[in-house]
């Protein structure tokens, strides 16, 4: 009995931080949604566009060292000189009138008489004002985003995020699934960075998951299909951009799920294709290596994109999925 009580106490001790963390995330999502809805009520810009912009900026700040970490609920970043106006001698100015005089982007969104760069509502309203100069419909929002970011890829990423938020109507979309069914016969180890020789010397930008031919390949998170087709290295492959601006690359497939198309929204665990051995040649080439899934992850920082090691994420997602499966029994 004594050992049983000790076990229960230890279980509660180690599980509590996880539960608290999940609750904190839900609370933050609720507060963010409240902010987006308030901006929508005043500007008539649909909340999912503001959520997509905010999440894009947050992911970019997390991926770069030259930008400060977000301190509040909003991830949108304005340089102090942009906020107050480049010619404004006071880059800590919060007076809406003087900021307007110097053509700054700062805006008093909550009506307290200050345009505070550290106030989440002021920041969100400031960005909304940029979009309002173009319009509140989808096409004009795209034009406004392009004029602000000057990058087609950024506009596409934000619009895809908005589609995801609009479809599911919520912000808590961070669940993941392992790329192949856990009950399938599969194996993998950390192969990221290994040397590859076919087609020229290069490094391996992913983790190989070996499995039987045709084993279902699944989306690992909520996202939008950015790419589908053939590549002489990866064979039949699919690329999915998730809500956190990470690009997930699935290669060497035996084929695609029926009706799978670019622009389609996917969920964790949704089948997108099958394990195969395609690649290393012209379209249709197959069988030059054992069947496996090449799974890669890439991060975009607003300027460029680079590969990072997916192995720790795969281990975590497998563990999380096993926990969910046990709860379902």
Image (cartoon, rainbow, N blue to C red):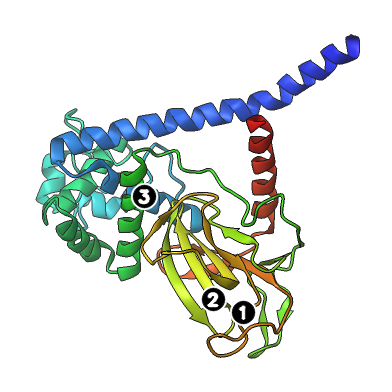
User: Callout 2: few (<14), some (14-19), or many (20+) C-alpha neighbours within 10 Å?
Assistant: many
CA separation in Å, label 1 and label 2: 6 Å
Q: Earlier in the sequence, mark 1 or mark 3?
A: 3
- Tell me the number on the disc at residue 268: none
Where on the picture, by quarter, is residue 255? Answer: bottom right
Q: Nearer the viewer, residue 169 or 121?
A: 169
Q: Nearer the viewer, mark 1 or mark 3?
A: 1
Q: Residue, x 69% and y 58% (percent of image)? A: 311
CA separation in Å, label 2 and label 3: 25 Å
**Height in image: 191 above or below 280?**
above
Residue 164 lies, in percent from the top left, at 36, 49
User: Callout 1: few (<14), some (14-19), or many (20+) C-alpha neighbours within 10 Å?
Assistant: many
Q: Nearer the viewer, residue 175 or 283?
A: 283
Residue 278 lies, in percent from the top left, at 61, 79
**Height in image: 196 above or below 327?**
below
Residue 199 lies, in percent from the top left, at 63, 90
- Tell me the number on the disc at residue 278: 1
Q: Nearer the viewer, residue 180 or 150?
A: 180
Where on the picture, by quarter, is residue 280? Answer: bottom right
Residues at discs 1 and 2 in contact (Cβ within 8 Å): yes
Residues at discs 2 and 3 in contact (Cβ within 8 Å): no
- Tell me the number on the disc at residue 236: 2
For mark 2, give the secondary structure: strand
For mark 1, give the secondary structure: loop
Residue 133 lies, in percent from the top left, at 11, 54
**Height in image: 102 above or below 111?**
below
Q: Earlier in the sequence, mark 1 or mark 2?
A: 2
Relative to 275, 268 lies left or right: left
For mark 3, give the secondary structure: helix
CA separation in Å, label 1 and label 3: 30 Å
Residue occupied by mark 3: 164
């Amino acid at each position: 009995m004594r050992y049983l009580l000790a076990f229960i106490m230890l279980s509660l001790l180690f599980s509590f931080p996880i539960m608290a963390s999940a609750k904190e995330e839900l609370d933050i999502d609720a507060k963010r949604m409240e902010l987006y809805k308030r901006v929508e009520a005043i500007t008539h810009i649909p909340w999912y566009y503001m959520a997509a912009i905010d999440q894009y900026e947050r992911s970019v700040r997390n991926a770069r060292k030259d930008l400060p970490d977000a301190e509040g609920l909003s991830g949108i970043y304005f340089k102090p000189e942009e906020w107050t106006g480049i010619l404004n001698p006071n880059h800590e100015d919060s007076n809406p009138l003087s900021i307007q005089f110097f053509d700054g982007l700062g805006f008093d969104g909550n009506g307290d008489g200050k345009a505070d760069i550290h106030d989440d509502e002021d920041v969100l309203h400031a960005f909304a004002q940029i979009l309002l100069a173009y319009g509140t419909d989808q096409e004009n929002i795209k034009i406004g985003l392009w004029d602000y970011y000057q990058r087609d890829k950024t506009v596409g990423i934000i619009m895809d995020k908005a589609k995801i938020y609009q479809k599911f109507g919520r912000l808590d979309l961070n669940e993941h699934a392992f790329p192949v069914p856990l009950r399938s016969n599969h194996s993998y180890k950390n192969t990221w960075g290994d040397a590859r020789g076919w087609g020229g010397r290069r490094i391996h930008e992913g983790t190989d998951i070996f499995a039987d031919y045709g084993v279902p390949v699944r989306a690992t998170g909520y996202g939008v299909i950015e790419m589908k087709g053939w590549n002489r290295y990866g064979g039949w492959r699919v690329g999915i951009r998730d809500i956190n601006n990470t690009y997930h690359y699935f290669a060497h497939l035996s084929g695609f799920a029926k009706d799978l198309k670019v622009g389609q929204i996917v969920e964790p665990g949704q089948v997108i294709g099958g394990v195969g051995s395609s690649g290393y040649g012209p379209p249709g080439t197959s069988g030059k290596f054992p069947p496996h899934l090449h799974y890669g992850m890439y991060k975009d920082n607003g300027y460029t994109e680079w590969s990072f090691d997916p192995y720790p994420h795969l281990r975590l997602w497998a563990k999380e999925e096993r926990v969910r499966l046990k709860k379902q029994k």
